Image: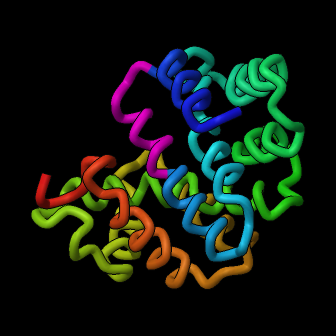
Amino acid sequence: MTRTDALELLYEYTKTDSLRKHALSVETSMRAYAKKFGEDEETFGLVGLLHDFDYEMFPTEEGHPWKGSEILKEKGVSEEIRTAILGHAPYTNVPRESLLAKTLYACDELSGFIVACSLVRPNKVDDLETSSVKKKLKDKAFARTVNRDDIINGAEELGVNLDEHIQFVIEALRGNAKVLGISKTE
């Protein structure tokens, strides 16, 4: 599957701009980590783009990401990619054994949280710092649907320091800030 194919699938199943941008933000973080780890950027990027593509149509634990995995299987997407996507939702109990799966889990909630932090700042992501993100993590009312435990556990499973992980994802998202709608100079 190419990136163009993945985008078409994302747009077919996902109609809201916010969830499409979330997919793009996770793709951005995943590609940055692939580069850092010397892994295949296309594969990591596809997993980021497609991890929630089925969420709007199948928003229950019985539906997402199971239905998406079935759709991807029908399209010939590898088991490695489908397993990584299944593993990003802790309630599936699919173990995250590959670096691909661990990276997706680590990037998913954090990418969304950093975008949320950026949207409430005058300079968006341009001057966002790790300390500001950590302060917002303590505010349970802010971006309340973001699972803080997934952010902490994701960094732990990936074997990276939480502060360094936050900073790395901030920098990755800055590189795609205009597309993600988090640039001051839009």
Image position, residue 1 (x, y; %): 71, 32
Snapshot quadrant of residue 124: bottom left
Q: In this view, does 127 lie to the left or right of 111?
A: left
Q: In this view, does 168 lie to the left or right of 21?
A: right
At x 52%, y 16%, the residue is 12
SS assignment for the magenta stretch, majority: helix
Q: In this view, does 184 lie to the left or right of 96?
A: left
Above or below, comparing residue 35 to residue 112 in the picture: below
Image position, residue 106 (x, y; %): 63, 62
Question: How is the structure coloured here?
Answer: rainbow
Above or below, comparing residue 64 to residue 131 in the picture: above
Image position, residue 82 (x, y; %): 80, 37
Above or below, comparing residue 151 to residue 142 in the picture: below
- Residue 64 is inside the magenta segment: no
Of the pair 6 and 96, the residue shown nearer to us: 6
Snapshot quadrant of residue 63: top right
- Residue 18 is inside the magenta segment: yes
Image position, residue 101 (x, y; %): 77, 55
Q: In this view, does 98 lie to the left or right of 34?
A: right
At x 30%, y 60%, the residue is 117
Above or below, comparing residue 69 to residue 168 in the picture: above
At x 23%, y 54%, the residue is 119
At x 41%, y 48%, the residue is 144
**So how many labels did they put on this image?**
0
Q: What stretch is highlighted in magenta?
A: 15-25
Of the pair 184 and 140, the residue shown nearer to us: 184
Snapshot quadrant of residue 41: bottom right
